[in-house]
Image: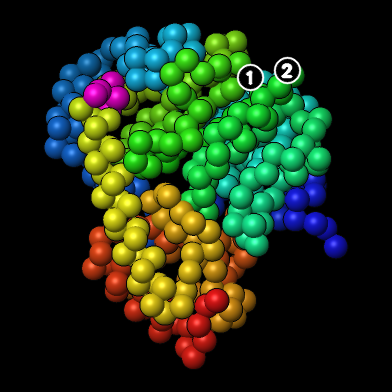
């Protein structure tokens, strides 16, 4: 029997292109998609409307590059705007000449999908629930010491686990590129454990950020990469011309202003409070998250009440949740649930309770 941490090429046993939007349905309360806002705030909508007057010109990313560099205290050569965080993984797969890539799972599946589409055969390092989906450097190195590309999320989608920055940084070494998906880091107050700390080395490192989750911009596609300037140059070389639209570049500048960063942090603190309500309501029923989450979602394991998924039963009660089995390392009984307002969380917990019958999750 394969140990959960063993290196293996899993082929096509999971639908790596499945995402939460495919679990939605007409009239359902959306707990499947993990964006904080359903629409951008008024001030950001004004920025987007103003940007439309420039649609006749090709996009110029100069101001966005400067804003990203200023936000993270790095040289402009270390940054690259992208069409959402997902494009960055395609650029990594196509722009870096890697031979032994490893993806740490369970996590966002697009990095592995992009590697496979580019002809690579990535191995998986699968974290386990019994360990709280925690990442251990020693265990990883025993299995993958010869890897030349490592991809890991922090905080990780779908578990919500925040890994220690020092443990992740220790993975960098000559001949290896570390890619850290920090798409949800701005949803954590103060952004602890980010690898983008002032003055820190970027050698061998690429950090992927997204603006879509916090600012309600999923349809606009706005994100960026910060990292080793040589690696960033390799990504830039394979990025199509004008890949990031003018409105997305304008949004990038606006969302990285001091005022917007402060607003995002306030939103992250509100999210903490709302997640605490959801977790407390679940605990009243004896249900605990599968891992301690700091993200805008929690992962539930309902297997104590049966191995099958309760997604369809919840849909019948009006709630859409993200299925778990398309994430390597998870099962149908796993459900990812987005954090919403307190009333919605209480209603969801009541609906979940009714689907569990006489059983209770451990």
Residue 174: which disc?
2
How is the protein colored in the picture? rainbow
Q: Are marks 1 and 2 in contact (CB under 8 Å)?
A: yes
- Tell me what residue is drawn at x 68 percent, y 44 percent: 136
* Residue 107 spot, x, y in % from top left: 57, 47
Q: Which residue is mark 1?
A: 204
* Quadrant location, the N terminus: bottom right
Side of 258 relative to 218 (left or right): left
- Badge 1 element: loop
- Highlighted magenta segment, given as a residue range: 253-258
- Tell me what residue is drawn at x 50 percent, y 82 percent: 360
Q: What secondary structure predominates along the stretch shown in magenta?
A: helix
- Tell me what residue is drawn at x 75 percent, y 56 percent: 4
Question: Which residue is farthest bottom?
Answer: 358
Query: Could you say which is closer to the camera, residue 283 or residue 16?
Result: 283
- Tell me what residue is drawn at x 29 percent, y 56 percent: 273
């Amino acid at each position: 029997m394969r140990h959960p941490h063993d290196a293996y090429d899993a082929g096509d046993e999971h639908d790596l292109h499945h995402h939460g939007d495919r679990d939605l349905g007409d009239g359902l309360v959306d707990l499947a998609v993990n964006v904080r806002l359903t629409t951008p705030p008024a001030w950001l909508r004004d920025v987007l409307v103003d940007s439309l007057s420039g649609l006749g010109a090709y996009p110029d990313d100069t101001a966005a590059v400067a804003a990203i560099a200023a936000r993270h205290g790095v040289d402009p050569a270390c940054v690259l705007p992208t069409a959402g965080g997902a494009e960055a993984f395609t650029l990594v797969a196509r722009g870096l000449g890697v031979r032994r890539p490893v993806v740490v799972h369970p996590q966002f599946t697009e990095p592995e999908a992009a590697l496979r589409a580019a002809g690579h055969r990535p191995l998986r390092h699968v974290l386990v629930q019994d360990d709280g989906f925690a990442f251990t450097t020693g265990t990883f190195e025993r299995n993958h010491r010869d890897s030349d590309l490592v991809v890991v999320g922090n905080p990780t989608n779908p578990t919500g686990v925040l890994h220690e920055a020092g443990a992740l940084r220790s993975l960098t070494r000559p001949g290896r590129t570390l890619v850290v998906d920090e798409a949800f880091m701005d949803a954590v107050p103060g952004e602890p454990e980010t690898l983008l700390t002032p003055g820190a080395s970027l050698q061998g490192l690429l950090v992927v950020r997204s603006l879509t989750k916090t600012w309600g911009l999923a349809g606009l596609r706005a994100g960026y990469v910060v990292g080793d300037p040589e690696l960033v140059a390799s990504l830039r070389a394979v990025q199509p011309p004008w890949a990031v639209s003018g409105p997305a570049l304008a949004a990038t500048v606006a969302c990285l202003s001091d005022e917007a960063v402060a607003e995002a942090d306030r939103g992250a603190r509100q999210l903490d409070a709302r997640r605490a309500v959801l977790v407390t309501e679940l605990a009243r029923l004896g249900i605990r998250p599968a891992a301690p989450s700091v993200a805008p979602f929690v992962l539930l394991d309902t297997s104590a009440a049966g191995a099958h998924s309760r997604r369809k039963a919840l849909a019948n009660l009006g709630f859409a949740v993200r299925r778990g089995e398309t994430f390597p390392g998870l099962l149908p009984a796993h459900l990812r649930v987005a954090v919403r307002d307190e009333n919605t969380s209480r209603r969801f917990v009541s609906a979940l309770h009714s689907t569990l019958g006489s059983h209770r999750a451990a």
